[in-house]
């Protein structure tokens, strides 16, 4: 399983189950590097998280980031370059690894193909190593794959969101050599912590059924979810976040353990 460290949770206001303490951020980076994680996933709009990692040693990490919505205008090229340059200066890095379009409205923006072509030029000039998209549904994925052959498409994937687990997506990604990065793999911790409070009654009901299933199966929820992710061979990278060193150690312990041989139908949870 190849992993990318997501740092949105370095901003304490992010997420439903965020217990990260600022003092733990440096030790998290040190630990994941020892575990072989050398990619960080962030976004230009993650200002607090970026400010924190800018003060840490990220020299050996590849940085993947996302652009906010780029409106087409006479100055769109300068806007993109300015966003990139300001980001690199703030983080004290020489190059962006993967530059992604973050806003789902971007692909419907006027003259988007021109914006896209400029991104390809940035790759040719080695200002970035690759480009990609962060998508939210299958239709967005299909539209993007018709327009371009991006290096990376970031998709949501977890036990309750299995929309992208289909042969059409797999065939397109393989044919166009698109690397798929899965995010929201633990639903911001909701799939690991049964005591998170929710206001939405529908979500409460679904999660109650899920936790009853976990308890009846006598499974470790982390191991249960990791086992599901390991089955998704078409995914190139999984974006994960950690609040502390203990979580990292538990994660890798579960990677090395086998779930009960009893067959579990994950489709029932999707």
Image (cartoon, rainbow, N blue to C red):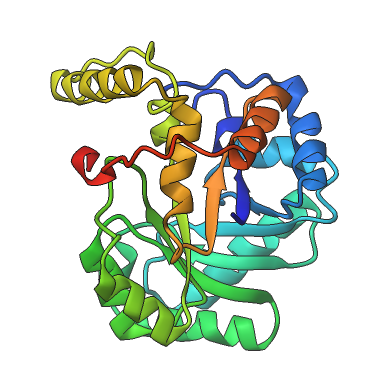
Residue 91 in the image: state x and y as whole percent.
75, 50
Residue 266 in the image: state x and y as whole percent.
28, 43
Q: Quadrant of residue 122?
A: bottom right
Query: Residue 8: in sight, yes or no?
Result: yes
Q: Quadrant of the N terminus?
A: bottom right
Residue at horizontal 49%, vertical 30%? 222
Residue at horizontal 56%, vertical 32%? 9
Q: Quadrant of residue 248?
A: top right
Q: Which residue is nearer to you in this view: 64 or 162?
A: 162
Q: Which residue is nearer to you in this view: 33 or 40?
A: 33
Residue at horizontal 62%, vertical 82%? 123
Residue 251 in the image: state x and y as whole percent.
61, 34
- Tell me if 258 is positioned left or right of 168 in this view: right
- Tell me if 1 is positioned left or right of 52 in this view: left
Q: Is residue 12 above or below residue 100?
A: above
Q: Is residue 245 above or below residue 197?
A: below
Q: Which residue is nearer to you in this view: 119 or 59?
A: 59
- Tell me if 108 is positioned left or right of 243 in this view: left
Q: Is residue 190 above or below residue 149?
A: above
Please identify the residue farthest to the left as the structure is shown: 202
Residue at horizontal 25%, vertical 23%? 207
Query: Residue 55: in sight, yes or no?
Result: no
Q: Quadrant of residue 169?
A: bottom left
């Amino acid at each position: 399983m190849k992993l990318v460290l997501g740092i949105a949770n370095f901003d304490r206001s992010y997420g439903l189950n965020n217990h990260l303490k600022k003092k733990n951020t440096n030790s998290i980076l040190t630990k994941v590097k020892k575990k072989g994680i050398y990619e960080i996933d962030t976004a230009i709009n993650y200002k607090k998280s970026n400010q924190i990692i800018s003060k840490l040693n990220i020299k050996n990490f590849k940085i993947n980031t996302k652009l906010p919505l780029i409106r087409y205008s006479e100055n769109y090229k300068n806007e993109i370059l300015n966003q990139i340059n300001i980001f690199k200066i703030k983080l004290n890095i020489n190059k962006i690894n993967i530059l992604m379009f973050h806003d789902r409205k971007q692909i419907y923006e006027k003259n988007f193909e021109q914006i896209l072509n400029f991104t390809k030029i940035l790759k040719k000039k080695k200002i970035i190593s690759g480009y990609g998209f962060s998508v939210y549904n299958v239709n967005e994925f299909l539209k993007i794959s018709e327009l371009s052959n991006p290096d990376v498409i970031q998709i949501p994937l977890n036990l309750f969101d299995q929309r992208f687990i289909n042969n059409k997506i797999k065939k397109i990604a393989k044919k166009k050599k698109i690397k798929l990065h899965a995010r929201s793999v633990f639903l911001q911790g909701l799939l690991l912590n049964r005591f998170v409070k929710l206001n939405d009654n529908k979500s409460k009901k679904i999660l109650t059924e899920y936790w009853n299933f976990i308890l009846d199966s006598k499974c470790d929820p982390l191991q249960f979810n990791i086992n599901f992710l390991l089955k998704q061979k078409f995914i190139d990278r999984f974006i994960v976040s950690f609040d502390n060193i203990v979580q990292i150690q538990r994660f890798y312990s579960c990677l090395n353990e086998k779930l009960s041989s009893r067959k579990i139908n994950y489709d029932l949870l999707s």
